[in-house]
Amino acid sequence: MSRDASSQPVLVAGGGIGGLAAALALSRQGHDVLVFEQAAQIGEIGAGIQLGPNAFAALDALGVGEAARRRAVHIDELVMHDAVDASLVGRVPTGAAFRARFGNPYAVIHRVDVHTSLLEGVQASERVRFHTGTRIVRVEQDDDGVTVEDQQGRRWRGQALIGADGVRSVVRAQYVGDPARVTGHVVYRAVVDAHEFPDDLKWNAASLWAGPNCHLVHYPLRGGAQYNVVVTFHSRQPEEWGVTEGSREEVQSYFQDIHPRPRQLIDLPRSWKRWATADREPIAQWSFGRVTLLGDAAHPTTQYMAQGACMALEDAVTLGEALRVHGGDWGRALDLYQRSRVARTARIVLSSREMGRLYHAKGVERLVRNELWKGRSPERFYDALEWLYGWTVERCLASPA
């Protein structure tokens, strides 16, 4: 490959939602892209995720917003109940007034369907190539570009490297080297067919039941043909970050003291996936020369704000915009990208921790939590959410340094 930097592709480590969004953003700015995915094929695992208006603004900027909208379920409200007594805690309508305020809907969607929408956009471009079964293990860089080495010792050259390789990012490990913060919170996720889901919980809503040291979430997927079921609890045992098969007996043992109405959810799935969750402390620097981080590699977060995938999409669009402004000057572009994202993503990480505390409150804290949103109008909720859902491409870049 020629060492002329302008003729080299941009390298992307990771073919998940963040990696594909980055590849799409880069290709739309005229760059050739080489995506390295350690799995044998490009795909996605998991269950449902939530997409706020900010995510749709990003998906639109990537040219795949309509494809994602077609696959999503556009819900009527966000609703929280107390899992102990089944009382209503708070409700945020997400209908016409919400869309008018934020310019986009709130929706729930299978993670695979987001990935597929991005993959279709990537495949429509002739600028993106994939290497599957390929894990980047080491990075070198000089003034002209970046060289990465994979697990088989092969070396690949590019203009720059985008590390979109997740919570256990090899790229982050080399340049930052900080430990993951294991939360001790365990998440069980499953998808249940509609005919097996309780009729009295078939709401067109993202529904959360907040309990002591635990909570439960459910919402429809794929036109209501399926329902996503997620339960979270504080583990009694030391945890290490990772995904394993779940045990029905374990998950049932953590939800003995909650109301029968939400508790019926944990009896539904025939199989569970078990996530022991982790995040990392926010960092002020994740760009290093011609190398930068994106998505969970840059700012891994817990799930309580439902913004992990949304932040990766925003990252990708912001990266593309920074390159548009600074052209082939990678140093200036990656600095602008980083400055535009650090404070916002750190706020998500820290807010997510606090939201987890609110969801899992017990004793008097539970009573305080239940009073926080009592009687609050939709407009007050919208005002409180403006910083999060009001993100737009037009305002995504930081002011000049």
Image (tube, rainbow, N blue to C red):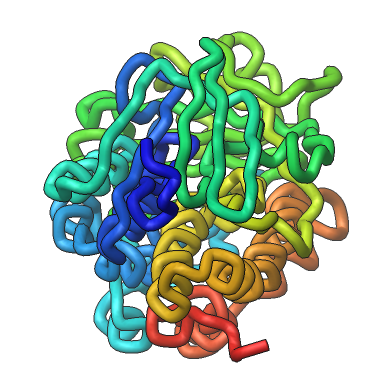
Q: Quadrant of residue 92?
A: bottom left
Residue at the spot 36% in from the left edge and 52% down from the top edge: 21
- Given residues 175 and 185, the one toward you in this image is 175
Q: Position of residue 141 (x, y in %)?
A: 63, 44
Q: Is residue 349 visible?
A: yes
In the foreground, 187 or 250: 187
In the image, residue 102 sits, relative to residue 68, either above or below, namely below
Where is residue 32 shown, x and y percent of the image?
Answer: 30, 49
* Coordinates of residue 148 in the picture (x, y in percent): 55, 32
Q: Quadrant of the C terminus?
A: bottom right
Quarter occupied by residue 53 = bottom left
**Above or below: residue 383 compared with residue 52:** below
Residue at point 35%, 67% (across, down): 58
Question: Residue 127 location in percent, x, y?
Answer: 22, 48
The residue depicted at 28 percent of the width and 56 percent of the height is 27
Total numbered labels placed on residues in the image: 0
The answer to whether 388 appears left or right of 321 in the picture is right
Between 81 and 153, the one lying in front of the other is 153
Question: Splitting the image into 4 quarters, where does residue 87 fall?
Answer: bottom right
321 in relation to 261, above or below: below
On screen, residue 159 above or below 132: below
Q: Is residue 342 left or right of residue 75?
A: right
Relative side of 201 to 151, left or right? left
In the picture, which quadrant includes the N terminus? top left
In this view of the protein, which residue sits in the foreground, 190 or 244? Answer: 244
The reply to whether residue 90 is in sight is no
Residue occupying the point 84% across, 59% down: 365
